[in-house]
């Protein structure tokens, strides 16, 4: 199975380390954000963005369970 087109990986524009979970479409471009930074900037992004695309969850993105650190 070849699916190169489906294997595009976006990395967070804020930290450049985490894989992006969201693509935020803006009038003057688009941003990729990991869920951490998307949530961090959500209020501002919701105002500027006309569309937010949630990327498919990857298998390695294990759910973060609440636990004491
Ligand atoms: Zn990030």
Image (spheres, rainbow, N blue to C red):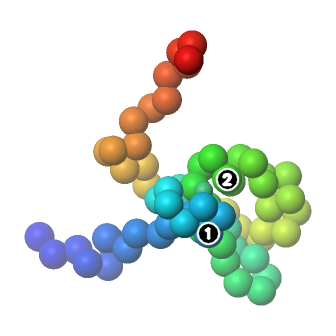
Question: Which labelled disc corresponds to residue 13?
Answer: 1
In the orientation shown, which residue stands out farthest toward the top? Answer: 68
Ligand 1, seen in the image, is in the quarter at bottom right
In this rendering, position of residue 69 left or right of residue 2? right
Q: In the rendered picture of this protein, how many numbered marks are placed on residues?
A: 2
Beta carbon of the mark 1 residue lies under 8 A of ligand 1: yes
Beta carbon of the mark 2 residue lies under 8 A of ligand 1: yes
Give me the C-alpha separation between circle 2 and circle 1. Answer: 9 Å
Which of the 4 quarters of the picture holds residue 28? Answer: bottom right
Query: Where does the C terminus fall, quadrant-wise?
Result: top right
Residue tagged by mark 2? 37
Q: 54 or 14, which is in the foreground?
A: 14
- Name above or below for residue 5 compared with residue 18: below
Which of the 4 quarters of the picture holds residue 30? Answer: bottom right
Which tag, 2 or 1, sits closer to the chain's start? 1
Give the secondary structure at mark 2. Answer: helix
User: Residue at point 80% right, 61% down?
Assistant: 45
Q: 36 or 46, which is in the foreground?
A: 36
User: Residue at point 60% right, 61% down?
Assistant: 15
Question: Which labelled disc corresponds to residue 42?
Answer: none
User: Residue 59 at x, y = what percent?
Assistant: 32, 45
In this rendering, position of residue 30 left or right of residue 50? left
User: Residue at point 45% right, 32% down?
Assistant: 63
Q: 16 or 26, which is in the foreground?
A: 16
In this rendering, position of residue 14 left or right of residue 46? left
User: Residue 25 at x, y = what percent?
Assistant: 69, 74
- Residue 5 in view: yes
Query: Where does the N terminus fall, quadrant-wise?
Result: bottom left
Dot 1: within a 10 Å radius of its alpha carbon, few (fewer than 14), some, or many (20 or more) residues? some
Give the secondary structure at mark 1. Answer: loop
Circles 2, 1 touching at the beta carbon (< 8 Å): yes
- Name above or below for residue 22 compared with residue 64: below
């Amino acid at each position: 199975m070849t699916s190169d087109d489906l294997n595009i990986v976006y990395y967070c524009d804020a930290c450049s380390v985490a894989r992006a979970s969201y693509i935020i479409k803006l009038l003057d471009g688009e941003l990729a954000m990991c869920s951490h930074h998307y949530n961090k900037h959500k209020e501002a992004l919701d105002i500027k963005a006309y569309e937010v695309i949630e990327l498919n969850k990857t298998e390695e993105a294990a759910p973060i369970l609440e636990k004491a650190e």
